[in-house]
Image (cartoon, helix red, strand yellow):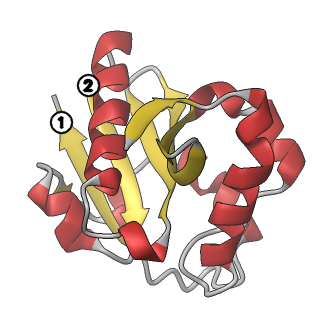
Amino acid sequence: MKLEKARINDANAVHKLINSFADKDEMLPRALSEIYENIREIFVVREEGKVVACAALHVNWCDLAEIRSLAVESALQNKDAGSMLVRACLDEARELGLPAVFCLTYKPAFFEKLGFTLIDKSELPRKIWAECFRCPKFPDCDEVSLVYRF
């Protein structure tokens, strides 16, 4: 497995991977145009040249970023691809000088193993909820919020 920043020609594969999980209500769907617009935020893991996992680091403000759209092909789950992606996002956040990174997830134990701690959603700035309006579960969010502080 090889981790690297996404390239333009990865957009369709990233789109398909993210939306395969969105179809199961496990994450928010992403439009292909949104993938292109935010391609520089995205990391991918390749196996034999094929995109098999992805995640994005989205900067929300001067002191906070979000790890979003973490998706790993089912056959490769529990084989370190997800951890590689989260660590890459954290490394980039550290390089940018951000003091904290949060995530919203249905798999809090995975993130806790990587040093994230639970946080009440009410502690997160309202600005982060702008995207939640697209979620079919809004306003009854059942995701767990966690934060990693440097």
The answer to whether the residues at label 1 and label 2 have Cβ atoms under 8 Å apart is yes
Q: Badge 2: few (under 14), some or many (20 or more) residues near its Cα, within 10 Å?
A: some
* Total numbered labels: 2
Closer to the camera in the image, 10 or 42: 10
Look at 37% across and 22% down and name the residue there: 92
144 displayed left or right of 12: left
Residue ID at (52%, 49%): 54
**Residue at disc 1, secondary structure:** strand
Q: Tell me the residue that label 1 is attached to.
A: 149
Q: At x 61% / y 84%, what residue is drawn?
A: 25
Q: Is residue 30 left or right of residue 76?
A: right
The front one of 148 and 9 is: 9
Image height of 127 relative to 122, above or below:
above
**Horizontal side of residue 104 vs 22, given as left or right:** left
What amino acid is found at the position of numbered circle 1 in the picture?
A: Arg
Q: Amino acid at mark 2?
A: Pro
Rendering quarter of residue 39: top right
List the single residue furthest toward the front: 48
The answer to which image quadrant residue 127 occupies is top right
Residue at the image position 51 percent from the left and 80 percent from the top: 141
Percent x, y of residue 100: 28, 33
Q: Secondary structure at mark 2?
A: loop
Provide the residue designation for mark 2.
Answer: 99
Q: Give the Cα separation between the discs numbered 1 and 2.
A: 6 Å
Q: Nearer the viewer, residue 36 or 93?
A: 36
Q: Is residue 95 above or below residue 79?
A: above
Is residue 118 at all visible to an observer of this figure?
Answer: no
* Residue 106 located left or right of residue 53: left
Residue 128 image offset from top left, x and y in percent = 55, 49
